[in-house]
Amino acid sequence: MRRKPIVFAILCCVLVAFMMTGCAGVQPTKSNFQDPKITLSHVEVPYYTGYWYFSKKVKPTKGSAGNYGAPMGLGFVFDIENPNGFPVLMEGIKFSIAFEEFELNTVSSNEMQWIPAGKTNQLRVNAIMDARSALLSLLVTGGFKLKEAGMSPWDALEKWWTQAPDASYPIYVQQGTAIFSAGDVTRGVSFNAQFP
């Protein structure tokens, strides 16, 4: 009676091994490896406390004083399409986040996932930002651009933090790179995106 579960388990292992080697026997080479396609499905705001900022001059109820800004969590949901006739392994992904083309943060994820041949997986990359670090980044990398646009960094931050849950302005994914491998082939794939 116990032979059926053992035989079933062996058949399942053989089937999985067959699928991982590319069912049709297609083996990955540098010449037949096609870059997977990475598109941004949407951006979510799963953590939000509104907009606030206070300086180290403000005496806290508990703890020590400092310059602090409101945190905001962003979830970037990507569709990753594998056009190959064999599975590919995504080894990691990295990209910069920009609000209205003002770069504010860089995030990465080293979570690996297999994408079956001819299929599309979804990947969520979470990023936590706060108004203080965004202000510093904005002043260092976007100061001249802000001045040219006639924008105050404080007005920009308030707009971005208060309107983010409604997706009222474009959020850009810039300088994105994902690393894929299959067999002996490893390739970096570049991507950029905008939401909405």
Image: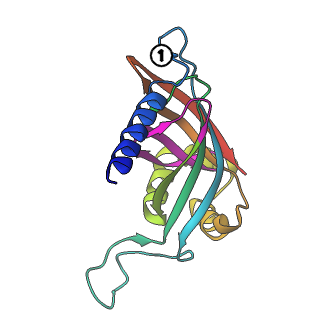
Q: Is residue 6 visible?
A: yes
Q: Residue at x 69, y 51 (%)?
A: 170
Q: Residue at x 46, y 64 (%)?
A: 130
Q: Is residue 110 visible?
A: no
Q: Residue at x 54, y 28 (%)?
A: 190
In this picture, residue 60 sits left or right of residue 22: left
Which picture quadrant has residue 169?
Answer: bottom right
Question: How would you rate the neighbour count of disc 1 (Cα within 10 Å): few for under 14, some for 14-19, many for 20 or more?
Answer: many
Residue 77 falls within the magenta-colored stretch: no
Q: 153 or 9: which is nearer to us?
A: 9
Q: Residue at x 48, y 56 (%)?
A: 126
Residue 10 in the image, given as x and y percentages of width and height: 36, 39
As displayed, is residue 61 above or below residue 6? Answer: below
As displayed, is residue 64 above or below residue 93? Answer: below
The residue sitting at the front extreme is: 1
Q: Main secondary structure of the magenta part?
A: strand
Residue 161 in the image, given as x and y percentages of width and height: 59, 67
Residue 185 in the image, given as x and y percentages of width and height: 42, 17
Q: 49 or 21: which is nearer to us?
A: 21
Magenta stretch: give its range: 92-120
Q: Secondary structure at mark 1?
A: loop
Q: 103 or 192: which is nearer to us?
A: 192
Q: Which residue is mark 1?
A: 28
Type of amino acid at the residue the image marks with label 1: Pro
Residue 35 in the image, given as x and y percentages of width and height: 57, 23
Q: 3 or 172: which is nearer to us?
A: 3
In this picture, residue 187 sits left or right of residue 170: left
As displayed, is residue 107 above or below residue 37? Answer: below
- Count of numbered circles in the view: 1
